[in-house]
Amino acid sequence: MIERKNIYCVIMAGGIGSRFWPLSRNNRPKQFLDILGTGQSLIQQTFARMTRICPAENILIVTSSIYKDQVREHLPQISDSQILLEPMRRNTAPCIAFANYKIKQRNPNAVVVVAPSDHLIMNEDEFVEVLDSGITFATQHDALLTLGIKPDRPETGYGYIQACKKPEAGIKNLFKVKTFTEKPNHELAKVFFESGEFFWNSGIFIWSLKSIVSSFEAHLPEVNTLFAEAAKSFDSETESAIIESVYSECRNVSIDYGVMEKADNVFVICSDFGWSDLGTWGSLYAHSKKDLAGNCITGNNVLTYNLKNTLVNVPKDKLVVLHGLEDYIVVESDNILLVCKKSDEQEIKKFVNDVLVEKGERYT
């Protein structure tokens, strides 16, 4: 059994959550919001969940330098050494490479769980059980594991993993990965769903530090070299300047494209613990309580007439009267109002870009 002191967790918390606009903004992204109304922000929930896996001092938060104060506000129990600040966004591969060398400095024998900061996990006991089995496997094998989620619909907003049919190493629901597929169109998603061989890509990973560093050396050598050199300056006065230089040179590349799709030692644990990446208003609607008309309403002064299957999220003191809407998203935040069909919610990122161009940064 692996000792808990050798288990580390990397929480990726640098995204801006633009598809949750206008509630999620550049200066207040969704990981710092209590979107579920639980009394805890998403990053607080993620941190608490990971303390069931490893010691709190072994949890690293990788985030944008502009969010340092918000991380400290939401997680006052962690030290500054646990917060890794990215000077600019460069996707998930540089984020993970940065964390790799921070962990290597502290514990070269570490096994690492990597998770986004803004996911919903409904069954945490099952989640912990799945992680425990994955950590055991990663300790004993040179393997890169990802958690695959059993789909319950032909979703077009997620990437998919195709699993081989034969289980690996006698572990239930653990398979070699056959293929990765980016977000499919509806027809392809329907084929994936009906085949039973495809699982949603959760973006949650498990591996030994040695395995992931070796994979970076093989598949993203230029990224790995940048951070290996930067590690010589860690915990010195020059660290911040060196990291800024590294990120300015580093290409924008995801861990899926840069490593997982190229490596031949990739495995998936097929799971069903009530997962959502909470990437869109529609995903929030799907996981929220609804009234008899199928409406999910946040706000104390909302009057509805002939409203059906609609998500409403407005400030508690805002008086809102809605009539005749069906299958809509209605969100108001900081004097910005969004009214959008649920079926068109993938357009929200385009809306945000247009607002930035037409109206400026203050609205994004």
Image (cartoon, rainbow, N blue to C red):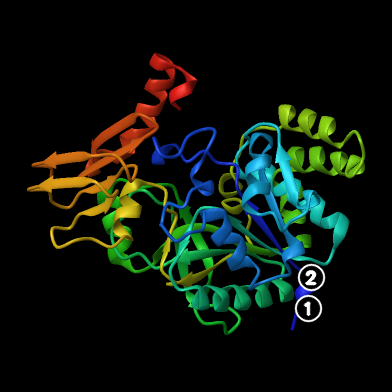
**Residue 143 found in image quarter:** bottom right
* Number of other residues with Cα within 10 Å of mark 1, as a class: few under 14, some 14 to 19, many 20 or more: few
Q: Quadrant of the N terminus?
A: bottom right
- Give the amino acid at mark 1: Glu
Q: Secondary structure at mark 2?
A: helix
**Residue 220 found in image quarter:** top right
* Number of other residues with Cα within 10 Å of mark 2, as a class: few under 14, some 14 to 19, many 20 or more: some
Asked whether residue 63 appears in the rendered view, the answer is yes
User: Could you say where residue 288 lies in the image, as x and y percent from the top left?
Assistant: 31, 60
Report whether 251 appears left or right of 200. Answer: right
150 or 119: nearer the eye? 119
Residue at (40, 41) in percent of width and height: 20
User: Could you say where residue 125 lies in the image, as x and y percent from the top left?
Assistant: 52, 78
- Give the amino acid at mark 2: Asn
Report whether 279 appears left or right of 132. Answer: left
Q: Residue 3's mark? A: 1
- What is the tally of numbered marks visible in this picture? 2
- Measure the alpha-carbon separation of dots 1 and 2: 6 Å
Q: Secondary structure at mark 1?
A: loop
The reply to whether the C-beta atoms of the residues labelled 1 and 2 are less than 8 Å apart is yes
Report whether 193 appears left or right of 349. Answer: left
Residue at (28, 63) in percent of width and height: 289
177 or 30: nearer the eye? 30
Residue at (55, 41) in percent of width and height: 15
